[in-house]
Image (cartoon, rainbow, N blue to C red):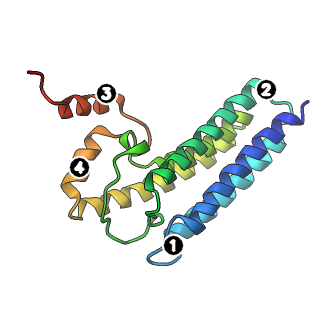
Amino acid sequence: MMLTWPLLSIGLLVASLASFSWAMRKFFFKPSGDNAGMKIIRACSSLSAFLNVVAILATPEVSARQTLMGAALYVSGLVLFYWAIRTHGKRSLSAAFSPDSPNHLVNWGPYRFIRHPFYSSYLMTWMAGFVATGRWWLLLSFAVMVVVYVRAAKMEEDKFASSPLADAYRIYQESTGRFLPRPIAWIKRKEADAPGLA
């Protein structure tokens, strides 16, 4: 039974990484080719994936409760990831660190609550490894990925700020968090958008 728990974590990690890899090939497009930022993300992600596999295999004595908590994060990350994919339908997104200018603003689906659901789903995956194993050094890997995704998100937000969508995006920013929901701001926006009572 001890071997079952690491296998569950490995299986969910592989499913997550396979999904992310598929999206890079089939969903995201690269208007400027394989830029330096994308290479950094790929290198950091590969290292983080390796460290997560090592941590999971090196922790066979992990409890069922701990593994299930990690599994819940893996699954939540996958659900968020595919929800974001489905929200876009057939309209692809440019890959991280692409220099193109945005021509549309998506504010439905998971985007109602967070501005960067893809990055949030990736971070949930990297945090899941730590939760499932308790290996503190995975927090260092997670911290590196946070820095990389914050830089990518900031670049995307700067692109919106200098586009014709700047005003709409600024209003959108006020009620949504970057990677985590802001429920109070979201509720206030919904109340402001609601028609007044007669």
Q: What residue does disc 3 label? A: 184
Residue 57 point in image, percent of width and height: 83, 44
| Residue with the mark numbered 1 | 36
Of callouts 2 and 4, the N-terminal one:
2
Distance, label 4 to label 1, CA atoms, is 28 Å
Position of residue 114 relative to residue 50, above or below, is: above
- Secondary structure beneath label 2: helix
> How dense is the environment of label 2, judged by Cα within 10 Å: few (below 14), some, or many (20 and up)?
some
How many marks the image carries: the answer is: 4
Q: Amino acid at mark 2?
A: Ala
Q: Nearer the viewer, mark 1 or mark 2?
A: 2
On the image, numbered disc 4 is attached to which residue? 170
Look at the numbered discs 2 and 4 and tell me whether their residues touch, using CB distance below 8 Å.
no
State which quadrant residue 68 falls in: top right
**Lateral position of residue 127 relative to residue 60, left or right:** left
Amino acid type at mark 1: Ala
Q: Identify the image quadrant of residue 188.
A: top left
Toward the bottom, the furthest residue is 33
Q: Is residue 124 above or below residue 36?
A: above
Q: Nearer the viewer, residue 83 or 21?
A: 83
- Above or below 154: residue 4: above
User: Which residue position is annotated with label 2?
Assistant: 64
Q: Residues within 10 Å of mark 4 (few under 14, many from 20)?
A: few
Q: Looking at the rendered structure, which numbered label has been put on residue 6?
A: none
Q: Which callout, 1 or 2, points at the residue further toward the start of the chain?
A: 1
Query: Which of the 4 image quarters holds residue 46?
Result: bottom right
